[in-house]
Image (tube, rainbow, N blue to C red):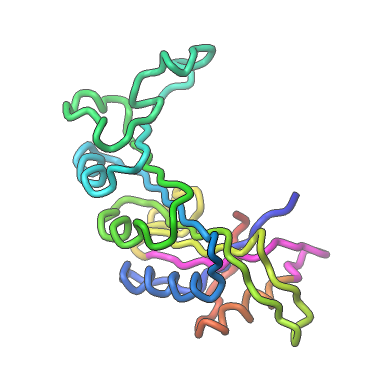
């Protein structure tokens, strides 16, 4: 069992620049079977309906109290709690009472299938795009082997944390490598710096366990 550690390589208020930078990193490690996923937390009915029109293939899940579903078969959960595709979402704003924020999830999709639309429609909401199943090359001059399991790129929108619990006025591109901590030090951090340099970037802050 091992974890990723994700290092920021760009922070910018320009979502288009953040996306193009993330894609530059992705292309450096892309394989035929690489995939992309995305997630957003939508805090108003208007945002849910707007995003669902543009991303109908997403899975939309409303907030809930665990007492609603404990020991209840999934088929008996409220529809918005169980999750709905965009076209199946209720149009009546009253249906969203006690259900905000609504989570939008897209998972295991081909690279290039939805990133432009997601970045364009997320607006002020917090969320992320994550490219996975990449492959980082060896860095023999640093005596580092490459990465497969932990080779990922993330783009955080309007937040700087994985949990989306802190709003921000900018977007952050993150480069993932395997976390390997010895005597309190991340010994693979130099590899993250090397990878960033190969794409013309620089690590701009401390890593975050992912």
State the residue at coordinates (56%, 78%): 196
Of the pair 167 and 23, the residue shown nearer to us:
23
Q: Is residue 172 magenta?
A: yes
Which residue appears farthest toward the bottom when viewing the image?
141
State the residue at coordinates (77%, 62%): 181
Q: Is residue 13 magenta?
A: no
Q: Where is residue 46 in the image (x, y as percent from the top left)?
A: 19, 41
Q: Where is residue 198 in the image (x, y as percent from the top left)?
A: 57, 84
Which residue appears farthest toward the right when viewing the image?
183
Of the pair 154 and 10, the residue shown nearer to us:
154
State the residue at coordinates (73%, 53%): 2
Of the pair 108 and 2, the residue shown nearer to us:
108
Q: Where is residue 171 in the image (x, y as percent from the top left)?
A: 39, 64
Give the quarter of the figure containing the C terminus.
bottom right
Residue 140 as seen in the image, left or right of residue 97: right
Which residue appears farthest toward the front when viewing the image?
32
- Position of residue 151 relative to residue 1, above or below, is below
- How many numbered discs sit on the rendered protein? 0
Q: Is the magenta stretch mostly helix, strand or loop?
A: strand
Q: Position of residue 120 (x, y in %)?
A: 26, 60
State the residue at coordinates (31%, 62%): 116
Residue 176 as seen in the image, left or right of residue 51: right
Q: In which quarter of the image is residue 5?
A: bottom right
Q: Residues in magenta? A: 171-187
């Amino acid at each position: 069992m091992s974890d990723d550690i994700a290092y920021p390589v760009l922070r910018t208020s320009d979502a288009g620049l953040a996306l193009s930078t993330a894609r530059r990193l992705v292309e450096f490690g892309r394989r035929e079977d690489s995939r992309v996923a995305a997630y957003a937390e939508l805090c108003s009915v208007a945002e849910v309906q707007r995003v669902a029109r543009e991303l109908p293939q997403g899975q939309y899940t409303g907030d809930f109290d665990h007492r609603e579903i404990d020991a209840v078969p999934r088929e008996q959960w409220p529809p918005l709690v169980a999750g709905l595709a965009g076209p199946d979402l209720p149009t009546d704003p009253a249906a969203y009472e006690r259900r905000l924020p609504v989570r939008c999830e897209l998972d295991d999709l081909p690279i290039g299938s939805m990133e432009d639309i997601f970045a364009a429609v997320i607006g002020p909401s917090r969320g992320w795009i994550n490219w996975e199943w990449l492959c980082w090359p060896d860095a023999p001059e640093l005596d580092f082997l490459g990465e497969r399991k932990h080779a990922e790129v993330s783009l955080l929108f309007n937040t700087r944390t994985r949990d989306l619990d802190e709003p921000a006025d900018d977007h952050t591109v993150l480069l993932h490598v395997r976390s390997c901590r010895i005597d309190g030090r991340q010994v693979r951090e130099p590899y993250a710096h090397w990878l960033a340099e190969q794409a013309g970037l620089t690590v701009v802050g401390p890593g975050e366990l992912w």
